[in-house]
Amino acid sequence: MSQSGPNAVGVDNTHRRKWNREEFLERARQREEQEEDGRRSKAKGPAVQRKPLKHRDYEVDLDSRLGKTQVVTPIAPLSQQAGYYCAVCECVVKDSANYLDHINGKKHQRALGMSMRVERASLQQVQERFELMKKRKVVSTFTEKDLDERILKQQQEEEERKRLRREKKKEKKEKAAEEDVEEGDADVAALMGFGGFGSSKKS
Ligand SMILES: [Zn+2]
């Protein structure tokens, strides 16, 4: 094979793959252009006007599952896994501090359609807010009687919780004893006609 071009310097007798430099240079240039375009259109993206930050209109629930036992499997849906689930972003964060950071964070607020900017308050708004706070302060002064009442209420709730827990435990034990009389409660075992060989634990 012989080439007779104007640039033919010699005969190519190697069998290496040859690249058409000009063609690939052109391709690289096009790719770079495309990437540049992509970047520009992405930069145009945030032109969407997001609303300024607003107050939360709900209480953040951090301790409703405190002290509870839960079986966690890796195949459970995200909302039932260990930690705090955010339904907006469909993610789970592992503790309350991170959860607070998350729901106050940029990503979450964006998902809610808000930017991280706050509206600038007018002088009148500030004055109104001060008035409101003053009023609220007067209302929230609670007496010792209130405190006593609250303590009493807490105690009652605690008793109720304990009672429920005890009942549940008992139910569980009874069920377990029905299925398998291993080490049931003494009275459960006696009820079923067995001598009390189990531990006579008082619940
Ligand atoms: Zn979120």
Image: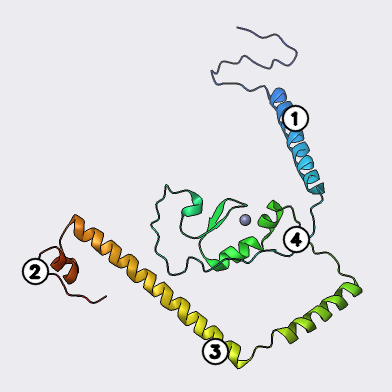
- Mark 3 secondary-structure assignment: helix
Judged from the image, the secondary structure of the residue bearing numbered disc 4 is loop
Q: Nearer the viewer, residue 174 or 68?
A: 174
State the mark number for residue 116: 4
Residue matched to label 2:
195
Identify which amino acid the numbered label 2 is placed on. Answer: Gly
Q: Which quadrant is home to the N terminus? A: top right
Location of ligand 1 given as a quarter of the image:
bottom right
Q: Which residue is mark 3?
A: 148
- In the image: residue 101, left or right of residue 70: right
> Mark 1 or 2, which is nearer the eye?
2
Disc nearer the start of the sequence (3/4): 4
Contact, mark 1 vs mark 2 (Cβ under 8 Å): no
x and y percentages locating residue 146 in the rendered image: 60, 87
Instruction: Tell me how far mark 4 sits from mark 1, CA to CA.
Output: 37 Å
Cβ–Cβ below 8 Å for labels 1 and 3?
no
The location of residue 163, given as percent across then percent down, is: 37, 73
Q: Is residue 85 above or below residue 1?
A: below
- Few, some or many C-alpha atoms within 10 Å of disc 2 (few <14, some 14-19, many ≥20)? few
Mark 2 vs ligand 1: CB below 8 Å: no
